[in-house]
């Protein structure tokens, strides 16, 4: 479904998902998913809850087996542990009782998978401080991570993912539960990281709008099927209608995008909010 | 000065062999349960820890029946129970609680049988009290090397898995994505928890073992925000509770009813609770002081302004 723009060639892609299908408990949750992510590119993975975004991340991380298709990360087939991927999972619950400072969480990104007790204090501390600076988190480095705000925690988790110097950063719904200001800060931070460090960012979200200013390409997921390309190529009535298998209208209001289901009858548009969390006019889900 | 010492330590305290053994065992076990228990609390496995201790009473009473030291019984059954919990519990928290409850029930049923057989075969009820509520003074000195060795093994395993445990306690998804064998780490931890709880059961009894596993770490979590620091503080709080408990229990021989010392386990467990409450009060004071300072200079003190950050969430 790539439009008139040249399709990136497979050889350069940092991530190449080719015809991936996944079955879970007798249901096909992903069907023939195909898209590429280039180095330094900012890609949005857009879809409502349950569309298959987290499953797709698990596939890329090598934690979910596929029934068809192939995935190349940095030109290589999937591995259980892939050092070129940094990952920020959805819903990390950070208990205020957890005896971890922001800097401890970041340090675990450096060597949390190793045996034994860390001994090279100085090198570790320096690397952690650098990373905290990069995400503008230095001033709360010594606070308990469970006491930080949602936006601050998200920055700490991003630093945790970045400190191992990945070339592809996966973020699963990092904007969920953030207020508008924190949302803007996190998006700007990610865009800066992608640009300055040439790290490819793949970020999932149920609302396309916060990502519109920074996104190079997007992958739209609906009912386990995907369409990918630039925003203008994908967020179009005919593309999304084909994806959903029913008529869909795309409205643009003040630079924001609304996707609404077109009813069969002449009464026009029926709109149903599927995601209670998205109380701003983002993608309105369809039935 | 001498007068003070004499009122604090009843005559013969420093010359008593059982007291020496109790001091050593109490300290070693408190250090291990402190380090292990920090992860029990942050992983939310207090119930599993409690169950492993109580289930141990079946093993302890069976060991007594067979003429072995209860420690081996505690440990044998607790490790088996840990395996069963992991096997039945799958990954979900609720299924895990159900599995823990089932294993706990079955274990206590066996304890009922073995304790009954113990009392009928030895015509004494003392063994029941010792198995369930323990006594630091009753720990056989011949068990010292085994207790120290098992403690060392537990500490070495915790140190080896330290970072993987922290990462998987933080987020299992994150740990799995980094290639940490989350399941294997969880099983290894459960086994080490079984060992730690068994050591605690040997010292303060199967029923009270969780007090030592949960109490000092919970106190430490109120006082420090560093993972390593929490393990050290928890160990020290546990040692303080054990040693002070031993002193008070020894002194209590001269308390009414005269000639019958109070159970040492009572003192240890009561002190654990007292330290927890004290820790809470201390943390509260520190927070209030920080907030006052934070009110004057909002941004500078951001690192310590727990409430400020919390409110922004």
Image (cartoon, helix red, strand yellow):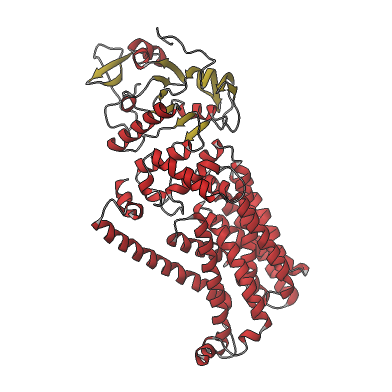
Residue at the extreme right: B66
Residue A208 falls in which quadrant of the image?
top left
At a point 51% along the width and 68% down the height, the residue shown is B237
Q: Quadrant of the C terminus of chain B?
A: top left
Q: Whole-percent x and y of residue A135?
A: 39, 38
Closer to us: B276 or B108: B276
Taking the spot 37% from the left edge, 48% from the top edge, the residue there is A140
Q: Quadrant of residue A42?
A: top left
Q: Is residue A237 above or below residue A164?
A: above
* Residue B309 drawn at (x, y percent): 32, 49
Q: Report the number of discs.
A: 0
Nearer to me, B254 or B20 = B20
Residue A269 horizontal/vertical position (percent): 26, 17
Question: Can see residue B129?
Answer: no
| Image height of B208 relative to A144, above or below | below
In this picture, residue B69 sits left or right of residue A5: right
What residue do we see at 71% from left, 59% from top?
A: B76
């Amino acid at each position: 479904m790539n439009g008139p723009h040249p399709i990136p060639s497979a050889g350069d892609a940092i991530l190449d998902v080719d015809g991936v299908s996944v079955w879970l408990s007798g249901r096909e949750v992903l069907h023939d998913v195909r898209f590429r992510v280039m180095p330094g590119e900012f890609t949005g993975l857009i879809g409502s809850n349950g569309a298959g975004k987290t499953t797709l991340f698990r596939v890329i991380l090598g934690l979910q087996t596929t029934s068809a298709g192939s995935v190349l990360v940095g030109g290589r087939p999937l591995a259980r542990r892939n050092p070129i991927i940094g990952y920020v999972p959805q819903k990390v619950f950070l208990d205020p009782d957890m005896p971890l400072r922001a800097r401890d969480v970041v340090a675990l990104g450096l060597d949390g998978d190793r045996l034994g007790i860390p001994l090279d204090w100085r090198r570790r501390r320096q690397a952690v401080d650098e990373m905290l600076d990069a995400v503008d988190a230095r001033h709360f480095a010594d606070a308990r991570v469970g006491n930080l705000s949602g936006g601050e925690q998200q920055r700490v988790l991003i630093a945790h993912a970045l400190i191992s110097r990945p070339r592809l950063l996966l973020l699963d719904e990092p904007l969920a539960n953030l207020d508008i200001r924190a949302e803007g800060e996190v998006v700007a931070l990610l865009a800066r990281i992608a640009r300055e460090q040439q790290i490819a960012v793949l970020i999932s979200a149920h609302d396309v709008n916060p990502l519109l200013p920074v996104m190079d390409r997007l992958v739209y997921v609906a009912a386990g099927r995907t369409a990918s390309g630039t925003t203008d190529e994908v967020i179009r009535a005919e593309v999304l209608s084909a994806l959903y298998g029913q008529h869909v209208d795309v409205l643009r209001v003040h630079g924001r995008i609304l996707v609404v289901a077109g009813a069969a009858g002449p009464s026009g548009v029926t709109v149903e909010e599927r995601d209670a969390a998205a109380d701003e006019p983002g993608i309105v889900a369809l039935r | 000065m001498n007068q003070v010492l004499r009122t604090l330590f009843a005559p013969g305290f420093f010359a008593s062999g059982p007291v020496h053994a109790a001091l050593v065992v109490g300290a070693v076990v408190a250090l291990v349960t402190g380090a292990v228990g920090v992860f029990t609390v942050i992983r939310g496995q207090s119930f599993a820890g409690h169950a492993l201790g109580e289930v141990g009473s079946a093993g302890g009473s069976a060991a007594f029946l067979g003429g072995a030291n209860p420690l081996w019984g505690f440990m044998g059954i607790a490790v088996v129970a840990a395996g069963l919990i992991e096997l039945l519990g799958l990954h979900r928290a609720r299924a895990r609680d159900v599995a823990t409850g089932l294993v706990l029930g079955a274990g206590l049923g066996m304890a009922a049988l073995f304790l009954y057989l113990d009392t009928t075969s030895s015509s004494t009820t003392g063994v029941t009290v010792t198995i369930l509520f323990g006594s630091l003074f009753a720990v056989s000195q011949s068990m010292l090397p085994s207790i120290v060795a098992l403690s060392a093994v537990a500490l070495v395993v915790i140190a080896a898995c330290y970072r993987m445990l922290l990462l998987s306690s933080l987020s299992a998804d994150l740990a799995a994505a980094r290639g940490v064998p989350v399941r294997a780490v969880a099983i290894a931890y459960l086994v080490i928890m079984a060992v730690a709880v068994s050591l605690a059961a040997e010292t303060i009894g199967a029923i009270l073992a969780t007090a030592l596993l949960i109490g000092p770490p919970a106190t430490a979590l109120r006082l420090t925000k560093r993972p390593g620091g929490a393990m050290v503080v928890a160990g020290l709080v546990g040692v303080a509770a054990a040693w002070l408990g031993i002193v008070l229990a020894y002194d209590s021989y001269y308390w009414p009813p005269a000639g019958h010392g109070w159970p040492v386990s009572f003192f240890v467990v009561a002190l654990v609770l007292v330290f927890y409450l004290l820790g809470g009060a201390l943390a509260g004071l520190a927070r209030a002081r920080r907030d006052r300072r934070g009110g004057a200079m909002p941004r500078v003190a951001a690192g310590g302004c727990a409430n400020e950050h919390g409110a922004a969430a």
